[in-house]
Image: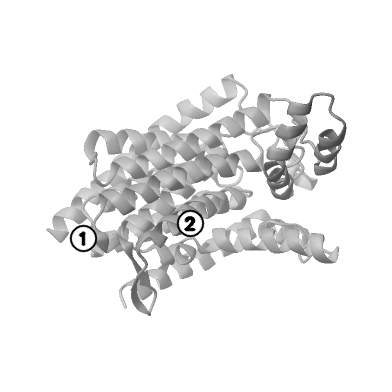
Amino acid sequence: MEILLLKNSLLFFLAAATASFLLAPIFIKFLYKYKITRRSDFDFTLYGDRQIKIGTPVMGGLLVIVVVTVITMLYNWNRKYTFVPIGVMSIAALLGAADDLLNIFGQTRRLRTLDQTLKLIRIHRHWYMRVWYVITLPWAWFKRATHMFGSHPGRGIQVHEKLLLQFVAGAVAAWWVYTKLSPHWHVLNIPLGGVVDIGWLIIPLIILFVMFTANAVNIADGLDGLAGGSLLITFTGLTVLSWIEGRTAFTPLNATVAGALLAYTYFNVKPARFQMGDVGSLGLGALLAINMISIDKILYIPIFGFIFYVETIAVILQVLSRRLFGRRLFKMAPLHHHFEFLGWSEEKIVMRFWIIHALAVVAGIWIALY
């Protein structure tokens, strides 16, 4: 049984890699034709020699999303196991695609400040609008509080809008795990520490991990090859772990993702033929979280997504430090930009991050089997 599962999973890996290699040139041509490319008028990370990235196609991650979805629907479709992971990935990918397209073709969106909202409460000529502004004041505060984590100058979907839609994707995943899978999935498998049954509290925990992981992969997608290669390492490790545990639906699914990512990374290493975009980073980040949850390893997500979590924590610390103490912890966040400002080459950063991430994934597999 284990050998058959391994053989089938390797076939899924090869099929996804082959399909992605064949489709990638066509896909790149399509992105160039419709000018779905990186622009200079809104991207504040295009400093120094990074100007050469202007004109590179974005939304390259859609290649992985499409290949994984089609192969899974044709050959590994299971309403109990693979239906919801693909659905959650699709929701997050659609959100990312909308953000990518708005960042390229949309107009700059201006967000009302909290002071402006308070002023409207006092002076708006219509009493019912004043009441509305009072009722929605907590939402206005939330929008401003999350705005500091957004991209400048905000052409695409705003942070509060992303979080709302990601909450929906996380809620779908949580509903599925809690109601459709066995009560065994209500138990937390604590690394090196046994298990704890937390019952319904698994629901907010799942939502949190799906949202955080999707955004973490998105934040780390800033250098050629960084996100794609790191995801390839992660999903390869997930394939090994799910095979060892005999997960007959998730082993081929993880192998399919790894195969598609292999081809994607081939075209994404510097100089990149295309870049992942939010469509890929948000979609694959959400899939990473739900696949870890599906094999009962929710608390292992920070280990298997190690470099993504490090990058995101660096951003959070940077924002908090600037807001609370008026100074930067890093020269620039995410962390890969900090090393760029220290003079490291893009290739050096990516390769070293890959190595560190691979060590974390191997450690995660060891801990899971301990």
Residue that label 2 marks: 209
Residue type at the position of mark 2: Phe
Q: Quadrant of residue 197?
A: bottom left
Q: Specify whether 167 is left or right of 260.
A: right
Is 327 rendered above or below residue 22?
below
Mark 2 packing: few (<14 Cα in 10 Å), some, or many (20+)?
A: many
**How are the residues colored?**
one colour
Location of residue 278 in the rendering, given as x and y in whole percent from the top left corner: 56, 40
Residue at point 19%, 52% (across, down): 7
Is 211 rendered above or below residue 311?
above
Residue at point 58%, 64% (across, down): 352
What's the distance in space between the residues labelled 2 and 1, CA to CA? 24 Å
Q: Quadrant of residue 362?
A: bottom left
Residue that label 1 marks: 246
Location of residue 266 in the rendering, given as x and y in whole percent from the top left corner: 48, 45
Location of residue 340 in the rendering, given as x and y in whole percent from the top left corner: 73, 57
- Look at discs 2 and 1 and give the one toward the viewer: 2
Q: Specify whether 154 is left or right of 169.
A: right
Residue at point 48%, 37% (across, down): 93
Location of residue 153 in the rendering, given as x and y in whole percent from the top left corner: 77, 37
Can residue 258 be seen in this snapshot? no
Residue at point 81%, 36% (across, down): 121
Can residue 1 be seen in this snapshot? yes
Secondary element under disc 2, as helix, strand or loop, is helix
Residue type at the position of mark 1: Gly
Q: Nearer the viewer, residue 367 or 193?
A: 193
Q: Nearer the viewer, residue 180 or 298?
A: 180
Mark 1 packing: few (<14 Cα in 10 Å), some, or many (20+)?
A: some
Q: Specify whether 29 is left or right of 36.
A: left
Quadrant (top left/top right/bottom left/bottom right) for the C terminus: bottom left
